[in-house]
Amino acid sequence: MKLSRKNGLRASAIGALVVSGALVLSACGSDNNTETPAKEGGAAKTSAAASNIACEGAKGQLLAAGSSAQKNAMDLWVKNFQAACAGVEINYQAIGSGGGITKFNQGQVAFAGSDSALKEEEVAESQKICKTGKGVNLPMVGGPIAIGYKLDGVENLVLDAPTIAKIFDNKITKWNDPAIAKLNPGAKLPGSTIQAFHRSDESGTTQNLGKYLSKAAPADWKHDPKSKSWPAQGGQAANGSSGVATAVKDAEGSIGYFELSYATANKISTVSVATGAAAPVAATTENASKAIAAAKVKGTGSDMALSLDYETKADGAYPIVLVTYEIACDKGNKAENLPTLKAFLNYTVSEEGQKVLSEAGYAPLPAEIAAKVRAIVPTLS
């Protein structure tokens, strides 16, 4: 498998997304994690990788905000970086992708975390802040978005893209609907009402689900695929992936979407997706990496935005995936922030920084994508 021959991303690189026994994006389960990362001298244990961090003039405080999907990764990176670089404080607020991009484009943070690449209008807006440059997308980690459900007596639920679209668009409202029954022969489906939950906040997870449905079920999902806000009518809203997961866990007959780690942490059953492959595909790290293998780099210059293949029919390829990015100015960064920004991002994308991701249940970047990002970070100015 490979991302794209023209971009030189080999299958071996994509295979690095898979971490045996690990859950991608377990940070997504930490929307409510308010623990402050340990500073130098703190009681928290610091990774041995911290000893290899090059501080390179880093000083003072660096503000960042955005995706909750990478919160635990950020906590590890911040803890290690602060332990190695005395007097430095990295403050990352996990407020969601939309909130992070807003703060970045208002000049309130040095970089933003996002589960989706900047839209054209967001890039244009970033030029007001970046002055001589623009915001660029630097991928850091990726993984599956699970469709979780609670339905007593029903295991191994299978849905396809049109059915998922109709459920979340309030067009299929009963669990024993013929479309669901056809995909689950022999299952004892109740006639109860489906309780569909979605994010109330702006979210890259919402946007990636929308992109998948727009590509895989265009006749049934006619909403704006670029929207980070929930675009459909009906359903019930909850804040953050943790809120959606909690709602699904607590409500019989419910369904929702969130990163895989939420399902695992809360023991929530997940849907297998019928894609047209030989068998329905379960939401696993390994299966998500097979879908990400078909991605292409669509960004130019210093931008590393990826175009994901949501319509894959490859056996074992789970199609509902996301990649998280750090968003920074390629040029025009504030002089007082630049040394710390570059030193910190150099660490997060380094072999040491990527290696510690497995400690938090993340998958490191594919080797060749990481190499491209490592070449870009030192050029930020």
Image (spheres, grey):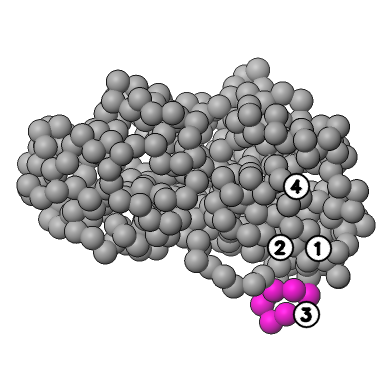
> In this figure, which residue is indicated by the disc labeled 2?
91
Q: Quadrant of residue 76?
A: bottom right
Is residue 362 visible in the rendered image? The answer is: no
Q: Secondary structure at mark 4?
A: loop
Residue drawn at x 85%, y 38% is 332
What residue is shown with label 4? Answer: 107
Q: Earlier in the sequence, mark 3 or mark 1?
A: 3
Q: Which mark is residue 41?
A: 3
Position above or below: 207 against 203? above
x 63%, y 23%: residue: 298
Viewer-side label of 3, 1 = 1
Compare residues 244 and 367 and report the one nearer the observer: 244
Q: Residues within 10 Å of mark 1 (few under 14, many from 20)?
A: some
x%, y% of residue 36? 64, 72
Q: Residues within 10 Å of mark 2 (few under 14, many from 20)?
A: some
Q: Quick one: label 4, few (<14), some, or many (20+) residues within 10 Å?
A: some
Helix, strand or loop for disc 1: strand
Regarding mark 2 in the picture, which secondary structure is present there?
strand
- In the image, the segment drawn in magenta is 38-45
Residue type at tag 4 = Gly
Pointer 3 or 4: first along the chain: 3
